[in-house]
Image (spheres, helix red, strand yellow):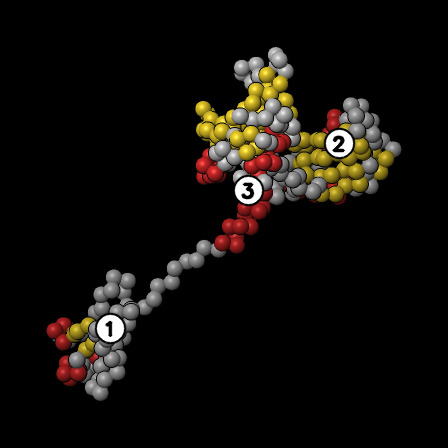
Amino acid sequence: MSLLHIKSSSLSSLSNFSTQKIFFYPTNFITFPSSLSFNSLSYITPNAPLFKTHKSLFLSQAAVETPISNEAEIEEDEEEEEDEESRTRVCAQNVPWDCSASDIRPLFEKFGTVVSVELSMYNKTRNRGLAFITMGSHEEAVAAITNLEAFEFEGRSLRLAWAKPRKKKVTPPPVLPKQVPIHNLFVANLPFQARGKDLMEFFNSENANVVSAEVIFRENPRGSAGYGFISFNTKEEADAVLSGFQGKMFMGRPIRIALSKKFLRQETKASLEQESTSSSNINSDGEKTETTTEV
């Protein structure tokens, strides 16, 4: 709020000023009598006291009201637009089962424009006794309901009401499988009788967090190739096994562990879940692999 302070020394020249009115203009200009000197006017600083022992005159700027938009009315307008269909759509029940949309349309056209007629069908030739008619306006829909309620149509008494708003179908976005980094280690000098399940149990018995284990098998002659692979979710887990399990005895043989040629590969949880607990697969070298997966 802007304030003006008029010194008491200049009040002697305002003999008739007390009876005059001061008007506030939007441009912030104030008209004073010609006898009043502008040199006697000074702005009051924010820290100056509002009341003094000598006479003072205070002028304040009037507040300007700004129009406030009615948000409630805007929301109501949006709701009316959304409900426009429900204000013109009529539900007709107890419709003859063998009638078609072309049979129903002339009946409602007596009361206005028929935008569409929909029949709920039981099969290709028989409806379910339920029809939905969209009229051109709300007034036409009201007229149709008023005049056709309990109307005899091909031997059946129609029952009319407002159709419920159709639910909007929301298609959820496709859920992509989460990518999980898999770190592989090569394990050699395995006993010929070892299987993927044995590898999994051996490493996880010491909290190695192996997520899958596979043993390579040869076709001719049929038998274990003596090596396999184990997989981890993180590089830290793989490094811990690489250093901590090197040379450990597994089923009577010291195992050798090294980084796989494809140390890091991308898998999905879906593909891991699809792998059976113990399944046989043939790799690119024509060797069968027995894989055990933990999900």
* Residue drawn at 87 percent across, 33 percent down: 155
Per the image, the residue denoted by label 2 is: 120
Q: Quadrant of the C terminus?
A: top right
Per the image, the residue denoted by label 1 is: 46
User: Marks 1/3: CA distance?
Assistant: 72 Å
Type of amino acid under label 2: Ser
Residue at disc 2, secondary structure? strand
Reply above or below: 286 against 55: above
* Residue drawn at 21 percent across, 73 percent down: 45
Q: Would residue 241 be found to the left or right of residue 195 on screen?
A: left
Type of amino acid under label 3: Asn
Tell me which corner region of the image, top left, top right, bottom left or bottom right, holds residue 213. Answer: top right
- Say if residue 273 shows up in the picture: no
Q: Residue furthest top?
A: 220
**Which numbered marker is on residue 29?**
none
Along the line of sight, the residue nearer the viewer: 171 or 100: 171
Along the line of sight, the residue nearer the viewer: 119 or 153: 119
Q: Residues within 10 Å of mark 2 (few under 14, many from 20)?
A: few
- Mark 1 / mark 3, whichever is N-terminal: 1
